[in-house]
Image (tube, rainbow, N blue to C red):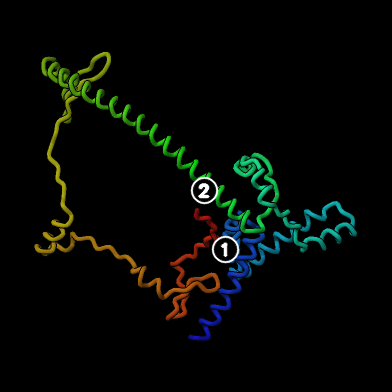
């Protein structure tokens, strides 16, 4: 059993490395490509890890083909040689330069145009960025407070209009009910009605219906021996069973038995980064 778990852990490590490589390469499309890899593994004899690397190879081949299309052999060789070379980093920026920048340059939508290329290289600039985030948050809070005050006024006006409508409707409905009793009207098994040009007066017959108290009714059924009318719901003890599980090689494995638990799926969650101000 120990060897099986060790082997599973090695497979898990390889799979995690493959998934991370795909995420680094594909960016926002990573989740879509991981789903494609899963389908590939299901439809072939590949493992999930092999399927992920197959998707990576496909992306690499497509990128290379697109790059060298229409080039001479020498140009293509030079272009392929440059593929593995890292891009030049964005230029560093000073605090003075940052303070002179227009806030609109980074507050704009990404679709509105390219943003200036620069990077933070010291604590002073990093602290400036934190202050800017705090300022934006304060502005958002101010706008939200203003909006909530306006919303409250609108809701108060709406509530007053609804009360007026309900009061007026209740009064006029009462008068129409009195009139309804003085005129002949059509009757069916469930209602009586009287048509006018601007509306129809209707009286629906009431009736009795039953409403149960589940807790008291269950106790009654138990006490009276009518257990066939009690529904029993089966649910797994997930909190307890989860402690026995481990993700290995792209699968969920029961650590005590070494078996793959097909009923439990793996949901990949991307890393997150936040700034607390």
Position in image of residue 119 (x %, y %): 67, 54
Residue at 65 percent of width and 39 percent of height: 112
Tell me the residue that label 2 is attached to: 134
Position of 67 compared to 149: left or right? right
Residue at 61 percent of width and 54 percent of height: 28
* Residue mark closest to the camera, 2 vs 1: 2
Residue at 26 percent of width and 18 percent of height: 199
Position of 162 compared to 129: left or right? left
Depicted 10 relative to depicted 20: above or below: below
Tell me the residue that label 1 is attached to: 38
Q: Quadrant of residue 170?
A: top left
Label annotation for residue 195 = none
Residue at 63 percent of width and 54 percent of height: 125
Q: Callout 2: few (<14), some (14-19), or many (20+) C-alpha neighbours within 10 Å? A: some
Q: Earlier in the sequence, mark 2 or mark 1?
A: 1
Position in image of residue 143 (x %, y %): 46, 37
Q: Nearer the viewer, residue 93 or 67?
A: 93
Position in image of residue 267 (x %, y %): 50, 62
> What element does badge 2 sit on?
helix
Q: Nearer the viewer, residue 142 or 231?
A: 142
> What element does badge 1 sit on?
helix
Position in image of residue 219 (x %, y %): 13, 61
């Amino acid at each position: 059993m120990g060897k099986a778990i060790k082997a599973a852990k090695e497979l898990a490590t390889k799979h995690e490395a493959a998934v991370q490589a795909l995420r680094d390469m594909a960016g926002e499309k990573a989740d879509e490509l991981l789903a494609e890899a899963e389908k590939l593994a299901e439809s072939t004899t590949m493992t999930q890890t092999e399927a992920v690397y197959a998707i990576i190879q496909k992306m690499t081949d497509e990128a290379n083909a697109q790059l060298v299309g229409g080039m001479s052999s020498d140009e293509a060789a030079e272009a392929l040689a440059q593929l593995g070379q890292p891009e030049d980093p964005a230029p560093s920026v000073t605090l003075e330069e940052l303070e002179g920048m227009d806030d609109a340059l980074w507050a704009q939508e990404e679709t509105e145009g390219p943003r200036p290329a620069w990077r933070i290289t010291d604590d002073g600039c990093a602290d400036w960025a934190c202050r800017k985030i705090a300022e934006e948050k304060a502005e958002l809070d101010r706008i939200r407070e203003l909006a909530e005050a306006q919303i409250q006024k609108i809701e108060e006006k709406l509530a007053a209009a609804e009360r007026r409508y309900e009061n007026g409707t209740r009064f006029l409905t009462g008068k129409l009910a009195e009139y309804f009793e003085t005129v002949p009207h059509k009757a069916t098994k469930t209602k009586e009605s009287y048509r006018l040009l601007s509306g129809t007066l209707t009286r629906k017959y009431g009736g009795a219906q039953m409403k149960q108290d589940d807790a008291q009714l269950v106790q009654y059924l138990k006490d009276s021996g009518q257990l066939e009318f009690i529904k029993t719901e089966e649910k797994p003890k997930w909190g307890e069973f989860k402690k026995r599980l481990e993700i290995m090689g792209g699968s969920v494995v029961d650590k005590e038995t070494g078996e793959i638990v097909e009923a439990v799926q793996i949901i990949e969650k991307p890393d997150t980064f936040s700034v607390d101000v």
